Amino acid sequence: MPKLLPTKIYRWTRSSFPLSFVVLLGCLGLLALFGWLSQEVLEKEAFDFDTTVLLWLHQHSNFTIDSLMLRITALGDPEFIVILLTISFSLLLGFKRVWAAQILFFNCLGGLILNQGLKLVFTKPRPQLWTPLIVEHSYSFPSGHALGSSVVYGFLAILLARQYPCYRLGIHGVAVVIVGSIGLSRLFLGVHYPTDIIAGYAVGLLWLITCVVILQMGGKR
């Protein structure tokens, strides 16, 4: 066993090598995707399908769909996320899951910094294709709702799946539906381009994977 590698980390890495390899390939793919989108945005290149997709979705808009999308997008609003995180953090501390609570805080803080920092780097304006039902004042790329929902709901799903392994598939499925629906709602409401959503998911998943790896290294604490 390598002298420089802690025993717990070494055993975890060796026992999960096939999965780790797949995750590594996935991370490289996400990095490549975000890198390509970032380059295009920095060069002020337009994606033709961005406008096409938004206009097509807007053609199917009606009062019922708009109302539904407003409710779904609220699941990714900062106000709701703060309430959800406060409850989750309190429960983790109450069950003496201090390590998980610490990583949850680290996970969310990092997601917030990434979101705000990247928006200031790219300064991409939001779509102006029709009068939106909600007004957003921040920049468009990447989508904060897509990034934040991936980080928050994804991490909470990981924690729940660890606690209730027999319901793992269902828990992950619900998280995927919530995160995907939030991204779709941003498109229906006309406040993001599809590439904003894709970039938000890419960054969010990369950061989520990083935090899950750190969580795993801490074991069941």
Image (cartoon, grey):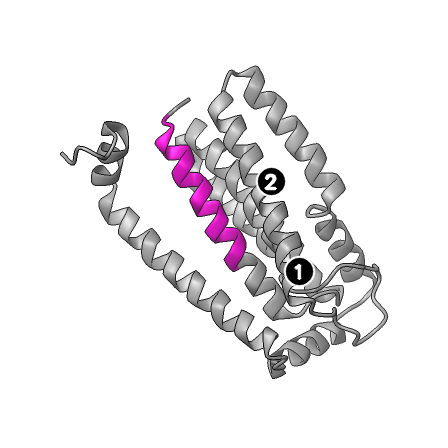
Task: State left or right for residue 133 relative to residue 45.
Answer: right
Q: Are the residues tagged 1 and 2 within 8 Å (C-beta)? A: no
Residue 44 seen from this side? yes
- Residue 9 drawn at (x, y percent): 28, 33
- Badge 2 amino acid: Leu
Q: Which mark is residue 109?
A: 2
- Relative vertical location of residue 36 with respect to residue 100 in this rendering, above or below: below
Extreme-front residue of the structure = 4
The magenta span reads 202-219
Near mark 1 (Cα within 10 A), the count class, few <14, some 14-19 or many ≥20, is some
**Quadrant location of residue 122?**
bottom right
Q: For the residue labelled by badge 1, is the local secondary structure a helix, a strand or a loop? A: helix
- Calculate the distance from the C-alpha at mark 1 to the C-alpha at mark 2: 16 Å
Q: Nearer the viewer, residue 205 or 68?
A: 205
Q: Residue at x 37, y 34 (%)?
A: 216
Instruction: Say which amino acid is labelled 1.
Output: Lys
Vertically, is 152 above or below 92? Answer: below
Q: Position of residue 138 (x, y in %)?
A: 76, 59
Q: Where 16 falls versus 118 (above or below)?
A: above
Locate residue 190, reporting x and y percent: 75, 67
User: Any magenta on residue 201?
Assistant: no
Query: Is disc 2 placed on a helix, strand or loop?
Result: helix
Q: Which residue in the protein does label 1 denote?
A: 119
Badge 2, how many Cα within 10 Å: few under 14, some, many 20+?
Answer: few
* The label number, if any, that marks residue 97 in the structure image: none
Q: Position of residue 49 (x, y in %)?
A: 61, 80
* The magenta stretch spans residue 218: yes
Of labels 1 and 2, earlier in sequence is 2
